[in-house]
Image: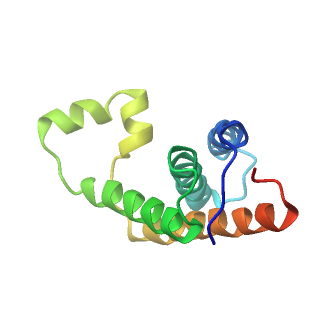
Amino acid sequence: MRIKRNRILYLFFIISTIALGLVSRAAFIPELIYPYLGDVFYALMIFWIFGFLFPRMSSKKIALISILTCFLIEFSQLYHAEWINEIRKTRLGGLILGFGFLWSDLVSYAVGGMMGLGLEYVLEKSGRTD
């Protein structure tokens, strides 16, 4: 699906998804989804960011690039050089790079990327992307 994205709308999506991701770490989130929800929102945020940066790229490419980006960041958590661990110790560095590799995070990222693809499909059908 090839669409023209409204950057203002996508900036709103990015900010909203960041807020949802931070709220997903609250105590009222059910234990069953608590470990995964933040990673789903992380991948969704990456999807919106790439959609913002590349407004004419196909939705499928955006989904693929966002999922692969999240996978690369997750696999980077297997690398523990002093310099990258120092970055991870900062609040922003820890939020972006994470701390420890988990296979389950890869599934969460795939779900988040596909969720972005599905939401964009709904937006396109409703005529709200441009």
- Extreme-right residue of the structure: 126
Image quadrant where residue 3 sits:
bottom right
Residue 58 horizontal side relative to residue 96, left or right: right
86 relative to 33 in the view: left or right:
left
Q: Can residue 32 be seen at all in this image of the molecule?
A: no
Residue for point 72% across, 58% down: 30
Residue 21: horizontal and vertical position, in percent? Answer: 63, 45
What x and y, as percent, mark residue 49?
A: 54, 46
Q: Residue furthest top?
A: 90
Give percent across and percent down for residue 28: 76, 47
Q: Residue at x 37, y 63 (%)?
A: 71
Residue 20 lies, in percent from the top left, at: 69, 44
Q: How is the image coloured?
A: rainbow
Question: Residue 87 is drawn in which quadrant?
Answer: top left
Q: Is residue 88 above or below residue 116?
A: above
In the rendered view of the protein, which quadrant contains the N terminus?
bottom right
Q: Quadrant of residue 23?
A: top right
Give the tally of numbered discs: 0
Residue at 38% x, 57% y: name it. 69
Res 3 visible: yes
Instruction: Identify which residue, 104 or 128, lies in the foreground.
Output: 128
- Look at the picture and state if 42 lies above or below 84: below
Q: Residue furthest left?
A: 81
111 vs 28, nearest the viewer: 111
Identified at 46% across, 69% down, the residue is 64
